[in-house]
Amino acid sequence: MVLGLNIIRENTDCFGLDVGTSSIKAVQLKKSFGKFELVSFGSASLEENVSQSDSDVDKKRVAEEIKKLVHSMHLVTKNVIMSLPGSTVFTTVINIPKMPMAELKKAVSYQAEQNIPLKISEVQIDWQVVGEVPAKNELLVMVIAAPKTKTQKTADLAQGAGLELSAVEINSIASARALQTNDPLYMIVDIGTFNTELTVVRQAVVTLTRTVPVGGQVITRAIAQSLGLEEGQAEQFKRKFGIEQDKMEGQIYKASRSVLNNLKEEIDRSVKYYGEQFGENIQNLKLTGGGSKTLGIQKFLADELNMNVVYGNPWEMVVHKQDVNNQLAGNAPDFAVAVGLAMRGL
């Protein structure tokens, strides 16, 4: 079972669309002889925070940018699968005694009402069994609740861009699909503009997901404040020199250290929580998201956490022409969600 919020219909002729804080990414794939093949991909920048706004004017602006991107990619299909960031939904893992499926559905509905701090009538709920507690004869069930206002906004964006919305799911589920590996247990660290989504994947199933308020822009602001720079200049320095200690006499590293420590501590906290809940130790991290491209962040996390940290590549399972190899490699961290959404439609 794929955990998602199906609000209209499934359609095999779809493309994936990831509307982020600062950019839009779109990917269309096809399946041939059991393999994913790249049909088209593209991205467009957005003004900061415009996609987070609920005003009709800003929604129209985002819809226009989506329309331009779709046109530039020469997409034939109007069917789209979109996603919601983890920061807009509520997720929790609950313990429920083992029981027949018919009874389990009722039990989950009841437990969801007790555990979700939102009115049940105002959310869309989906759930999945993610593990067991044999000693207690219990099931571990992950429940996701998405406010209907958020799914409706997503539907409005699609409609405004002249598209037909086929399904909506959360970013972490899409990323996990795109970054599947043979590793039995790992954590995806998706560093966005303002937030980082931490997703634990066990045997190809998402078993834990949470969002922490640390992102690329947060690091940029810390650098700007510490060095007395405008944010635009601080961003340029960050992109050029990264957070490596041997660049600019370590000034950028020192300026961003407190933010990086917050990220490290949140990852460590999640790893320990998972170990307590599931009795397994996470040793592997996969980095993705635009913020993960900052030079030095991979080494920092590997050294500080004493874990194996690698970059996830959503294009690994996608057959494509050689002439786009460099382009795909350069943007791999940005496209995990969009690729995962495109895979959902096949």
Image (spheres, helix red, strand yellow):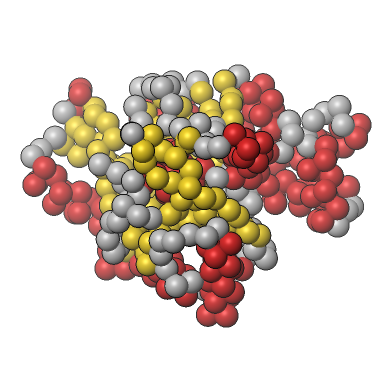
Q: Residue at x 48, y 35 (%)?
A: 319
Q: Residue at x 10, y 38 (%)?
A: 99
Q: Nearer the viewer, residue 209 or 45?
A: 45
Residue 192 can be seen in this image: yes
Q: Residue at x 82, y 28 (%)?
A: 245
Give x and y (percent) for residue 143: 30, 48
Q: Residue at x 60, y 19 (%)?
A: 306
Give x and y (percent) for residue 175: 46, 41
Up the image or down, 311 lies above or below 239; here it is above
Determine whether, in the image, residue 246 is placed left or right of residue 84. Answer: right
Query: Toward which corner of the image does residue 298 lie, by quadrant?
Result: top right
Q: Nearer the viewer, residue 337 or 108?
A: 337
Residue 19 can be seen in this image: no
Up the image or down, 119 lies above or below 178; here it is below
Up the image or down, 310 lies above or below 330; here it is above
Give x and y (percent) for residue 35: 38, 34
Determine whether, in the image, residue 275 is placed left or right of residue 251. Answer: left
Most distant residue in the bottom direction: 57
**Picture mark count:** 0
Which quarter shows the N terminus? top left
Up the image or down, 67 lies above or below 344; here it is below
Query: Toward which corner of the image does residue 149 lie, by quadrant?
Result: bottom left
Determine whether, in the image, residue 11 is placed left or right of residue 135. Answer: right
Q: Nearer the viewer, residue 338 or 327?
A: 327
